[in-house]
Structures are given as structure tokens and as C-alpha cells.
Image (spheres, helix red, strand yellow):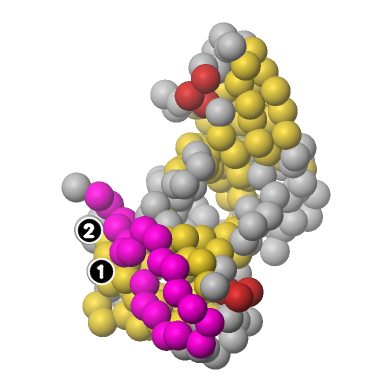
């Protein structure tokens, strides 16, 4: 069983379209995250949810909207896609919102490579 | 938020011990130090975490000096499959906005 799974793995779309990426974790973790990894491999946090409540909302365009229907799911919806949105998006989870400490830190999904053309 | 500095890249031959050092001069009292490994087309994977002194698990060892301003990830007898990017992360979680550093790209040579 995949601990943190995200779909789709690849997403190619045209500028201006709206797309969603889904994420699910079966670890029973309370906190979920969205990270963006750009072409230079920098990993930057975008959002964090703890028990369905938004706790971190980094400075990202409001075209990006996370939604957490329950604590096992965190989806990312992106409106009016732009070329600069091309990146790999990672979903992650942690046992609680102390993702930086504790036994296992963050558990990441395998990523969604978004290409905007 | 403690900023981390790591070497951009390292090369090592198979079977050697590899030590990757991370500097975090402004680490806070509550901060932990965590290392992650990332293979191409995969998400980062937790390797090891520590607060002070030495921590060892089945994969690696983590050495942290008393002042905690740096840490060293030690990989014993690396193999080709250890070729990856290794990230050092410092923080105490909670509401901190955590950004991974540049990471160290380790290339293991046959």
C-alpha cells in the first residue's frame, strides 16, 4: 500500500486551463502539505493543513486553492494555469504539525509533474 | 527559520564512507535536524533525525556537535543505489514555513 499517493503522476495542459491534483494518505497522519519543486530542485512549502484546517498558507498566487475534505485527503486546484506553474508538486504528510520532529518527519508522495504549454 | 548550507555536490567511490556536512549557524533551541534523500522522479524520503550528539539507524549516522551549528550525515559503505540528492532540514515544525535547502547531489562511482 502506498502511504501517500497523488494523482496524476504527469499532467500536461495548456495555458489558461484549470486542473486539480489529488492526494491521499493512509498513515493516519493529522497534517498534510503541498510542496512545489522547481527546475532548480528547490522544495518550497505552499500549504499545510492540520485536521482539515489550513495552518500554513505561503505566498502563492490565489489561483492555487487547496481543499481538504477530510484529514486523509488534500487536493490542489489550480486556475488559469501559466507557464511558470510548470514544476513538480509534492504532497506530504506528518503525524502532527510538528513535521520537523518526531520519529519520521514528513512522508512524501511521488510527485506530480505539471507541464504547462 | 534556520537557514542551511550544504555542498552542492559530492562524488564517492562505491564502498567508501561518505560524510555530508550541513551548516545551520542560527539554529534555534527547539529545532531538530532532519535529513532526507531524494531519488529522481520521487519524493524526498526521511533518513534520520536528531537533536544533539549522535544518532544511528540502519541506514545512516548523524553527528551533531555540542553547539549544534552544524551536523554531519554519515553513510557507511555507499553503493551505486545511494546516488541521490540529500537534504538537510532544520526546524521545530508547528507553524514554521519550512523550505528545504539546495541539497547535496551525491554521485557514487563504480
Compared to residue A79, the image places residue B65 above or below, namely above
Residue A66 position in % (x across, y down): 41, 81
In reply to whether residue A16 is colored magenta, the answer given is yes
In this image, B108 relative to A66: left or right? Answer: right
Identity of the residue drawn at 28% across and 72% down: A73
Element marked by disc 2 = loop
Spatial CA distance of label 1 from label 2 is: 7 Å
| Residue visible at 62% across and 16% down in the picture | B109
The kind of secondary structure element at disc 1 is loop
Considering depth in this image, is B101 or A28 the residue closer to the camera? B101
Q: Position of residue B105 (x, y in %)?
A: 66, 36
Residue matched to label 1: A72
Within 10 angstroms of label 1, few (less than 14), some, or many (20 or more) residues? many
Q: Which mark is residue A97?
A: none
Can the viewer see residue B36? Answer: yes
Q: Chain of mark 2?
A: A
Which residue is depicted at the point 70% across and 23% down? B11
**Which residue is the site of mark 2?**
A26
Residue B11 drawn in magenta: no
- Magenta range is A2-21
Residue A45: name its quadrant.
Answer: bottom right
- Chain letter belonging to callout 1: A
Which quadrant, please, contains the C terminus of chain A?
bottom right
Amino acid at each position: 500500500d502506498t502511504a501517500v499517493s497523488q494523482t496524476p503522476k504527469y499532467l500536461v495542459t495548456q495555458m489558461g486551463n484549470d486542473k486539480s491534483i489529488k492526494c491521499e494518505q493512509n498513515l493516519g497522519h493529522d497534517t498534510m502539505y503541498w510542496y512545489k519543486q522547481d527546475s532548480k530542485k528547490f522544495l518550497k512549502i505552499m500549504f499545510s493543513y492540520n485536521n482539515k484546517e489550513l495552518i500554513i498558507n505561503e505566498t502563492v498566487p490565489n489561483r492555487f486553492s487547496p481543499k481538504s475534505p477530510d484529514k486523509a485527503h488534500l487536493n490542489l486546484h489550480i486556475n488559469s494555469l501559466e507557464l511558470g506553474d510548470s514544476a513538480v508538486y509534492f504532497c506530504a504528510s506528518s503525524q502532527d504539525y510538528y513535521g520537523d520532529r518526531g520519529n519520521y518527519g514528513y512522508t512524501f508522495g511521488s510527485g506530480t509533474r505539471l507541464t504547462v504549454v | 527559520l534556520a537557514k542551511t548550507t550544504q555542498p552542492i555536490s559530492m562524488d564517492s567511490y562505491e564502498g567508501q564512507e561518505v560524510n555530508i556536512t550541513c551548516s545551520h549557524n542560527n539554529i534555534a533551541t527547539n529545532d531538530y535536524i532532519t535529513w532526507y534523500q531524494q531519488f529522481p522522479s520521487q519524493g524526498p524520503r526521511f533518513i534520520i533525525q536528531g537533536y544533539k550528539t549522535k544518532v544511528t539507524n540502519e541506514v545512516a549516522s548523524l553527528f551533531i556537535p555540542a553547539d549544534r551549528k552544524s551536523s554531519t550525515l554519515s553513510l557507511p559503505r555507499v553503493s551505486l543505489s545511494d546516488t541521490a540528492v540529500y537534504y538537510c532540514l532544520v526546524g521545530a515544525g508547528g507553524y514554521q514555513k519550512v523550505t528545504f535547502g539546495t541539497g547535496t547531489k551525491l554521485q557514487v562511482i563504480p
